Amino acid sequence: MTPEYDHRAIEEKWMERWEEEGAYLAAPDPDRPKKYVLVMYPYPSGPAHMGHVANYSLGDVLVRYYRRIGFNVLNPMGYDAFGLPAENAAISEGSHPATWTRNNIELISRDLKRLGYAYDWSREISTCDPEYYRWTQWFFLKMYQLGLAYKGDAEANWCPSCGTVLANEQVLSDGSCERCGTNVVSRWLNQWFFKITHYADALLEDMELLEEWPERVLTMQRNWIGKSHGAEVDFTLESTGETIRVYTTRPDTLYGVTFFLLAPEHPLVDKLAAGDAELESEVAEFRERVGGVSSFERTALEAEKDGVFLGDYVINPVNGESVPVYTANFVLIEYGTGAVMAVPAHDQRDFEFARKFDIPIEVVIQPPDGDLNSEAMTEAYEDPGTMVNSGEFDGLPSVLGIEDVCDLLESNGWGERAVNYRLRDWLVSRQRYWGAPIPIIYCDSCGTVPVPEDDLPVLLPEDLDVRNDGRSPLPLEKSFFEVACPRCGEDARRETDTMDTFVDSSWYYFRFVSPQDREGPFDTGDAEYWMPVDQYIGGIEHAILHLLYSRFFTKVIYDLGLIDFKEPFSRLLCQGMIILDGAKMSKSKGNVVTPGEYIDRLGADTLRLYILFLGPPELSKEWSDQGVEGARKFLSRVWRMVHERYLTPMENGEFGRGADEHRGRAMRSITHCTIKNVTADIEEFAFNTAVSFIMELVNGVYRYTSGGDVDREVLVESVEAVVNLLAPFTPFICEELWQAMGKQGSVHQQPWPSFDEELARPEKITLVVQVNGRVRERIIVPSDISDEEMKAMALECENARKFIGEKEIRKVIIVPGKLVNIVV
RNA sequence: GCCGAAGUGGCGGAAUGGUAUACGCGCUGGUCUCAAAAACCAGUGGGGUAAAACCCCGUGCCGGUUCGAGUCCGGCCUUCGGCACCA
C-alpha cells in the first residue's frame, strides 16, 4: 500500500525535527573549507512574497549542495527592520512602527521556516535592535573620526505641507508628495554625508577583483560613478576681471566656445544681476520656472532649453574672444564647477540653446568625410574629427588635440587637466523617527561633538507615537534631545535626524559572523574565518546602491585595519523578478500571489521546486498557477515511484540480479549521466535544467520498471540518485523518502552522489547523417564507433545515397560520436 | 538619448558552431472505471498527402562568414530593465 503524500504532515514533522537537532547551526572549523552563502535579508513588510521564495530557494539549493560536497557553510538570516514603510503603516493603521515591524518579522520568519531553508537561526539579527544599531552608530563615529562623515548643504525634496524631507521614491512622477499630493519643492538643508567620493577610484579599480560578478552590475556601477577625464579652464569675467572656472571633457573644442553658462543656483548669477532691476526680476522669474520645483521635476520632463542673458561677457583664454554669459536650466550646480563653456557646434544641448537664443555657432571639428557648415547644421557633431579654426592646432586630429590643448593650458597657467565623477557623496540624514539616531551632540560652546563610544547606543525612544502628519516626533521629545555636552557638561542638543537604512544594510553581513559580540561590530577572528561572503544573492534592483555602499563600508573597515580584504562579496548572483501577467507583482496593482496559501495547499517543496524550475535565475519569470500544479504532480510521481516501483515490489521480492544486461546498462547510463549533469548545472546556477534532468531520470525509472526484467541493484542506484539529487531542491519530501527507504541519518548529510564517467556514456548513440548540411538520416550505432566506421555507414545508408546521386563527393566532415556531413 | 538584457511551439523554457523545440504546462487519444477524477501509456511547430513513407518551410528582420548558424560577424526592428541635460 502506498501511503498518501501528505505534505502538511511531512513538512511539519521535519521542520520541527531539524530545529530540535540544530541541524543547520554553523561554527568555525579551521580544518574544513568554508563557504559563506548570503541572500539579501528582507525588509519585513508582511509575510514572505514570491520574490523572497525565488531568492531564498535559490540560496538554499546552493547551501545544501555545498554542505554535501564537504564545505562548512554559514547561512544566516536577519531583518532590515528600520525604514519608512513602518512609519507610514503606523500612521494609517494607528500602530507603532516597532510593533508593526516585530509583527511582520514574526510573519515572515514563520514563512521562511515553513519553506525549510537551512538557516542558522541562532544568528538571527534585526537592524532595529539596539545591540545592532549600537554598532551602526559606532561606524558613524569612525567615519566622523576619519573625516568621512561631514555636515554640508544639500538640495532635498521638501514637502511644505508635511514639513519634511522626502526620499526620491516618495516623490511621484508628477512631482507631488506621495502622502498628501502637495507639490514638492527643492530646498537646501544642512545634512550629514558620508564621503564615498573619497573612494571613487578605489571603487572603480577594485572592480578588477570582482571577476565573478555579473558584467551588467559592474557596468551599472561604473556608469554610476561616472569618472571622466578632461580639463578645468579659467575664463575671465570682462566687467570685474575675476576668473570663473569650468570643467570640460572636450578641451579640443575650446576654440568653438561662443557663449558661457552658469547654473541657476550659481552665486555669480545674483552678483551679475545685482543693480539692474529689470534683470533681477527676469532672473527671479527664471528661477521660479526652473528652480522652484525640485530638480527631480526639472529633469523628469524633457524640459526645453531655457535661460537668461546676464548682461556680461567672459574672455576665452586661448583666443581672447569675448562671449556672452547666460544662466541656463540644464546646467547643474552639483556637477563640475557649476559653470559651462558652451560649444554649440559640438554639443547637442549647447546647440539647442544657441538656436533658441540666436547665438552664433562655430565649427572647430570637421568630420573625416564631411564639410560641416554652421548655418546648415541641424544637430551638433559630437564625434572626433580634424581641428579647424583653432589657431595653431588646425589640421590636428581632435583626439590628439585634447592632449595638446591641455599642455597649452597648463604651460600658460590658464587651466589644468582634471577628472570628474558623477558620483555624489552619500546623504545619510533622514528627518525620520524609525531609524538609527545619528550619534552627534550640538553644544553652544564646543560645537559639534560626537557621542563618546562608551555612551552607545544612543537609544531610539520606543514609547513615542508617530505623528499623523508624518513628521518625526524626535525633535519634540525633550527627554531625547536635551542632553549634557559630553565635553563641557553644559546643556546641549542631540541630533534628531536618523540614518538612512542603507547604512544599516551596508555592514550587516559582517555582524552575522559574530552576532552576539559585545566588544565590537564583529569579531575579527570569526571574520577571518568566514569572510568575505563567497556567494551573495539578491535582486537586480540593488545593483547600484546597496552593493556600492557595502563595498564602500568594506573599504573603510579595511582602512580601520579590522580586515585584510577589500571587497565583501566574492561572487554575486542577481535574481530576476517574479512577474504576473507581464507586470511586477505589487499591492497597488493587486496582482500579488502569496506563498503562504501555496505552502498550505500544495506544500513548501512544491513551491520551491516550481519557482526554481520556472527559468534561469537571472531572468524575470512569469508566475503560473497551472505550473505550480505541475510541480506538485512531479513530486507525487516521485513519491509513487519510490513506493510503487521500488519499496513494494522489493518487499514482494520481485527483483533479482543480473537481469537483462542491456536494459540495466541503459538505466545506469541515465543515472550516472543525470548525476553528472545535475552537479554541473547546480555549479552554474542552472537550476531549471537541473530539475529537468532529474525529471528525465524519474521518467527513466518508470520506463525501466514498466516492462522487462529489473535488476535490483540498478534500481536501487537510480532511485537513491533521484532522492539524493532532488534533496537540495525539495528537502522535506526527500528526507521523508530517505527514511522510508530505511536509510540511516539525514539525506541532507549524505555525501553528494558521484558518477562514473564510463557509465555516464550511453552504450548506443544516434549517428546523424547530413548531405550538404541537411539531415538526411539517423542511425543508431554503438557509442564507441570509430570515425572510419561512421563514414562508411553514412555513405552506405539509403537516404544519403539518394541525395548524393551521381554528384561528386567533395568532402566528408566527421564529428566523432555524433555526425557525418557529406558535401557534394 | 545613453547603457544593459531579451526576442525560439498555444504557454514557461532547452540547445560547447553539429539532430531546433529537451523538460514541464496545456491540448488530443488510449488503458483503468458504471461514470468521472486521479494515475499510467502514447501523440502534439507549420505546410503538402486520405494516410504513411517522404519532401518543403521554420529560432524578430536583412545581409555575411562556414561543409554546417538559434548560436559567430555587420546592419536594422521590437520589448523589458537601469540611468537620464554629468559639460
Image (cartoon, rainbow, N blue to C red):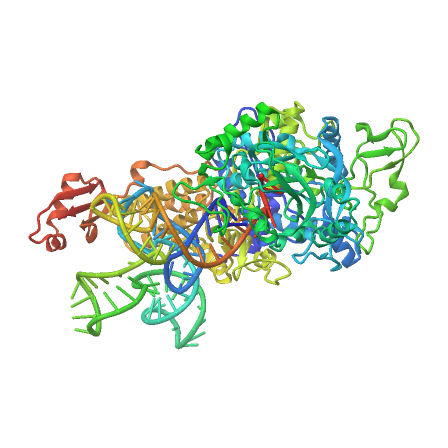
- Front position in the image: A103 or B59: B59
- Which percent across, then down, holds residue A737? 48, 48
Image quadrant in which you'd find residue A49:
bottom right
Q: Residue at x 52, y 49 (%)?
A: A576
The count of marks equals 0
Q: Residue most toward the right?
A: A490
- Which percent across, then down, holds residue B9? 37, 62
Residue A52 visible: no
Q: Is residue A563 above or below residue A222?
A: above
Using residue B57 as the reference point, say whether residue B23 is left or right of it: right
Using residue A61 as the reference point, say whether residue A516 is left or right of it: right
Residue A355 visible: yes
Q: Is residue A397 above or below residue A602?
A: above
- Which percent across, then down, holds residue A779? 19, 50
- Front position in the image: A390 or A204: A390
Task: Give the position of the N terminus of chain A as an image quadrant.
Answer: bottom left
Q: Residue at x 62, y 30 (%)?
A: A199
- Which percent across, then down, holds residue A94? 80, 57
Q: Residue most toward the left?
A: A806
- Front position in the image: A811 or A192: A192
